[in-house]
Amino acid sequence: MANILRRHVLLLMVAAVLFSTVPVSNSIPFILFHGIGDKCSGGVSNFTQLLSNLSGSPGSCLEIGNGETDSWFMPLTQQTSLACEKVKMMKELSQGYNIVAQSQGNLVARGIIEFCDDAPPLINYVSLGGPHAGIAAIPKCSSGPFCAIAEALMKLEIYNDFVQDHIAPSGYVKIPGEMTKYLGHSKYLPKLNNERPDQRNSTFKDRFVSLHNLVLVMMMGLILCCQLNRQNYTEKTGSV
């Protein structure tokens, strides 16, 4: 019962952010990015429709490639590039839009915010269980021969160029004892988080702090819901 109640509270909170500061007659559309190993049909489609119903805003799940497989085997840099082009082609987003993202989809969402030039303005961003600081262990794939291949490659050498170019989660694996390798060879998260001191890009930070609302939801029962504190966050970290 408690889990059901928390889920309802979460959905209402997300809907409230999507609907905030917007007149009923001019609801801001939203796009949803699903997580790893998922696709826009089935449960994700139902979730998108539920958010749309609760918020009164039109919404759609943005699929990258074939979804389920490419979420594992298309590098995040390529996923972000494809998503960027799709967003720019969606005329309904031209006056502004919101993003809701689940797990790995958050890294694509943030890539759009930071890297996508000439994109329509993003207003609110809701992150559900996003691995923004990376993950310290190799993620578990469900089943099947492709999963076995992915896991074997990542266990062999996570920061190898071939693995980085072919296995999406390798782009945000951040092993604490291998920070030199991570900063030198990880091809996605260090750039996204402005972690390389000699390559920091203030444009990435400026685009991120231009959001009207940022909501971060941790999937262990802790919910952080707040307006982005631009000055405190950026002055202390110097990074996104």
Image (tube, helix red, strand yellow):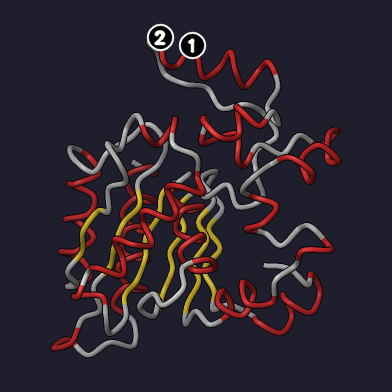
- Location of residue 96 with respect to 131 vertically, above or below: below
Label 1 Cα neighbours within 10 Å, binned few <14 / some 14-19 / many ≥20: few
Q: Quadrant of the C terminus?
A: bottom right
Label 2 Cα neighbours within 10 Å, binned few <14 / some 14-19 / many ≥20: few
Q: Label 2, label 1: how many angstroms apart (C-alpha)?
A: 5 Å
The amino acid at mark 2 is Pro
Q: Quadrant of the N terminus?
A: top left
The tag on residue 84 is: none
The amino acid at mark 1 is Ala
- Location of residue 64 with respect to 178 vertically, above or below: below
Q: Position of residue 170 (x, y in %)?
A: 60, 34
Q: Position of residue 26 (x, y in %)?
A: 18, 87
The residue to which callout 1 is attached is 148
Relative horizontal placement of residue 77, taking residue 34 as reference (left or right): right
Relative horizontal placement of residue 150, taking residue 156 as reference (left or right): left
- Tell me the residue at 40%/9% (across/down): 145
Relative horizontal placement of residue 155, taking residue 48 as reference (left or right): right
**Nearest to the observer: residue 193 or residue 88:** 88
Q: Position of residue 112 (x, y in %)?
A: 45, 64
- Tell me the residue at 76%/34% (across/down): 175
The residue to which callout 2 is attached is 145
Q: Position of residue 167 (x, y in %)?
A: 52, 30
**Nearest to the observer: residue 168 or residue 104:** 168
- Tell me the residue at 44%/31% (across/down): 72
Q: Secondary structure at mark 2?
A: helix
**Cβ–Cβ under 8 Å for marks 2 and 1:** yes
Q: Secondary structure at mark 1?
A: helix
